[in-house]
Amino acid sequence: MRTFDAIAAPHALAPIVSALRAAGCVFAEDEAQLLVAEAPDSESLVEWVDSRISGMPLEYILGWADFCGERIAVDPGVFVPRRRTELLVHQAVSLLRDRPSSPPPVVVDLCCGSGAVGTAIARLYPEAELHSADIDHAAVNCARRNVDAVGGRVYQGDLFAALPPGLHGRVRILAVNAPYVPTEAIRTMPPEARLYESRAALDGGDDGLDFHHRVAADALEWLLPDGHLLIETSRQQAGRTAGIVAGAGFTVCTVHSDELEGTVVVGSPQ
């Protein structure tokens, strides 16, 4: 049995690694090092290890997630940014750099959660004018901590209804990481997501594509003629997401990264 002294002893990583590994943590050594480095005191370290063993996401315990090489503040219940979503950021920044513009390009991070996508884009492309939005109050509060730091604005509301009308026809990049897990598939997700993250941040409807339909249907009126709609999707759903976007009047390409295990559908106005 673990003891307070064994876990709290300075540099005693071994018992923490063993406890995390026994609990099923795939990256037990890395997580143990983070917990030891970030815990403010020995008592907190023990509490943090217990929380991780119980299944609480590491990001909720630490209060941040590593995303695109930077720390993104993450509050309990708010969707934890995944590494695969870095592909969405890279694609957006690549499109911005391909065609620099004046005035500064408007970037919208829709269904922003913690604000990770928009914040990362703004850090990599500081000239961007960032607007982020989410329907969830907790997510909006969390996003403000991240987005405010890069000079962006955050709004609460349902998809485009959250955005200022003045953005109509001005958006250069519309980056969307909306929920795309089919409702029935949520029960098969890892407990970290299924039990701790907001269901509203995961549930994409019967086939997982409800939000993709809604976003694609209204995106054109918000975009510049040379703007782009970027939607994260799964590799399995990519064909259907691409079909939805094409059906809404876009020329479509699909980008996949084996390294990040990410997939993004990019739509450009025809």
Image (cartoon, rainbow, N blue to C red):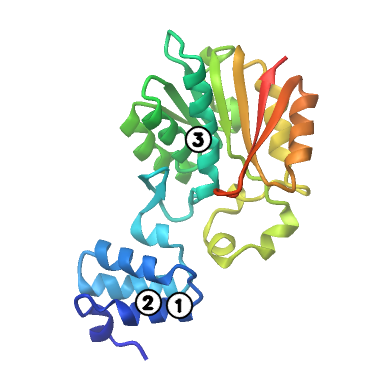
Q: Are marks 2 and 1 in contact (CB under 8 Å)?
A: yes
Quadrant occupied by the C terminus: top right
Which residue, given by chain and number where applicable, does mark 2 sit on? 17
Residue 93 is left or right of residue 244, and the answer is left
Q: What residue is rendered at 60% in x and 13% in y? A: 226
Along the polypeptide, which appears first: circle 1 or circle 3? 1
Amino acid under label 1? Arg
Q: Identify whether 182 is placed above or below 221.
A: below
Amino acid under label 2? Val
Quadrant occupied by the N terminus: bottom left
Residue 161 is left or right of residue 54, and the answer is right
Q: What residue is rendered at 63% in x and 45% in y? A: 179
Q: What residue is rendered at 41% in x and 34% in y? A: 119
Say whether residue 34 is visible: yes
Q: Which of the 4 quarters of the picture holds residue 209?
A: top right
What x and y, as percent, mark residue 210? 73, 40
Along the polypeptide, which appears first: circle 2 or circle 3? 2
Q: Which mark is residue 89?
A: 3
Mark pair 2, 3: CA separation: 33 Å
Which residue, given by chain and number where applicable, does mark 1 sit on? 21
Residue 123 is left or right of residue 183, and the answer is left
Identify which residue, 223 or 33, lies in the foreground: 33
What x and y, as percent, mark residue 113? 50, 42
Specify the farthest residue to the bottom: 1
Amino acid under label 3? Val
At label 3, counting other C-alpha atoms closer than 10 Å, the crowd grade (few under 14, some 14-19, many 20 or more) is many
Q: Identify whether 44 is placed above or below 143.
A: below
In terms of secondary structure, where does tag 3 sit?
A: helix
